Image: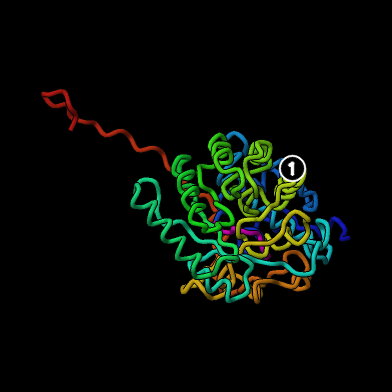
Amino acid sequence: MGSTSTFPRIKEIRTFIIDGVGSGGDYHNVKGGHWLVDSNISNPMTRDVSDLFEKMYRASMFYGRKGLPVAVISVIDLALWDLVGKIRNEPVYKLIGGATRSRLDFYCTGPQPASAKAMGFSGAKVALPHGPDEGTKGLLENIAYLRKQRESVGPGFPLRVDCYMSLNVSYTIELVKRCEAEGLNIDWWEECLSPDDFDGHALLKRAHPTVKFTTGEHEYSRFGFRKLVEGRNLDILQPDVMWVGGLTELLKVSALAAAYDLPVVPHASGPYSYHFVVSQPNTPFQEYLANSADGKTVEPVFGNLFLNEPIPTQGYLDVAILDRPGFGLDLNPAAPLIPAASILTPAPQRSLAAPVEQELGSNGFTY
C-alpha cells in the first residue's frame, strides 16, 4: 500500500484521464469530465472508488443518469481503477476477486462467421441487415441472409444475431418464428427492441419462451438494469463497462444478475472488460469485435492506441497475460490523443448579439 502522498492529486488524475497518462477507457467521451473530477474528487484518496462513483453519479443526476454523463463517469472510474492497480502493483482483476479461470474464451462479432470459426472463436455474431420498414421483402431477405451464415459455419457452431434496437415486437416474433421453423438454430437474439421497451421484452419471451434474448449494451447503471433483471424476460445481460458507469457499477450489475442466475457477457470494451470477466463466476466468455478492414483479421480493439493491447489467439487469452499493474496497458506515444489544453481551457465568453431590427411588411410578416 502506498501512503497518501503517493496518490495522484486532482490535476494528475485529470491529466491522466484526458491526456492519456495511463488508460481511462472510452477516451473520446471525456469532454466535460474535468468538471466531475474537480467538483467531486476533492482529496487524493483515489482508491475510494465506490464513494467517488456515488458522488459523480448524484452530482450529475439532474441531467444525467444515462447516456453521455454516465459514460464520462465510466472513463473516470476506469482511470481510478487503473491507478489503484498501479499503486498496489496488482492487475485490476486481482483487486476485484482474482481469477475464476486460467483462460478467457471469446466469441467474434463481425461479417465473416466462417472466418471466426476458423480462427478458433467459440461463436460468431452478425448484424441483421433489414428492418421492419422494408416489409415482407426485407423479412425474407433477413432469413435468407441468416440461412447463408448458418450454412457457412455448419449446424453446431453458435450463431448470434445483433438487431441493434431496430425491430418492434410483432416483427421480432414473426422473424424468430420463421427462423425457428427453418432450423437455423440462432443461439441468441440481441437488442431486438428499444432499451426502454421493458413490456416488449416480456411479450417476446411469452411468445418464444425457449429462445434466448439478450440486451443491456445501451443500459446505464444498476438502476437501469434492475427492471431488466427483475422482469426475468432476458436470458443474458450485456453491459458495456465504458458506458454503464465503469467497473465500480458493472460489479454491482453483475452481483444483481448473479442473484437471479443470469449470465453477464459484456459488450466489447477490450481489456477493460477482460479483467472483469475473468474475475466473476457468472461471466462465461467475452465478445471480440472484428474491426479489421476485411472483417476476418484479429487486430487490437483500440487500434494503435496502446502498444501492448492483448488480443485473442485461437479464440482465447491466457489469464496470465493480464498480470500487469492496473489494466496493464501502455499508451502509444504516436497515437492521436485529445490535447488536455483544448478541453480544459474555457472558450472566451461572448455576450449575446443585440437583436437585429426587422422591417414589418404590409402583410404583417417580417423580412
- The answer to whether any part of residue 58 appears in the image is no
Identify the magenta region: 22-28
Number of marks = 1
Instruction: Identify the residue under disc 1.
Output: 260
At horizontal 45% and vertical 65% (from top left) the residue drawn is: 148
Q: Amino acid at mark 1?
A: Tyr
Q: Going by the image, does 98 lie left or right of 74?
A: right
Q: Nearer the viewer, residue 31 or 273?
A: 273
> Which x, y percent locates residue 339?
55, 62
Q: Nearer the viewer, residue 133 or 47?
A: 133
Q: Please, which residue is most extreme toward the left here? A: 362
Q: Nearer the viewer, residue 288 or 145?
A: 145
At horizontal 48% and vertical 40% (from top left) the residue drawn is: 169
> Which x, y percent locates residue 298?
57, 74
Magenta region, main secondary structure: loop
Q: Is residue 176 in the magenta section?
A: no
- The answer to whether any part of residue 346 appears in the image is yes
> Which x, y percent locates residue 268?
60, 60
Q: How was this image coloured?
A: rainbow
Corner quadrant of residue 64: top right
Q: Is residue 227 above or below residue 343?
A: above
Q: Is residue 365 above or below residue 90?
A: above
At horizontal 56% and vertical 44% (from top left) the residue drawn is: 67
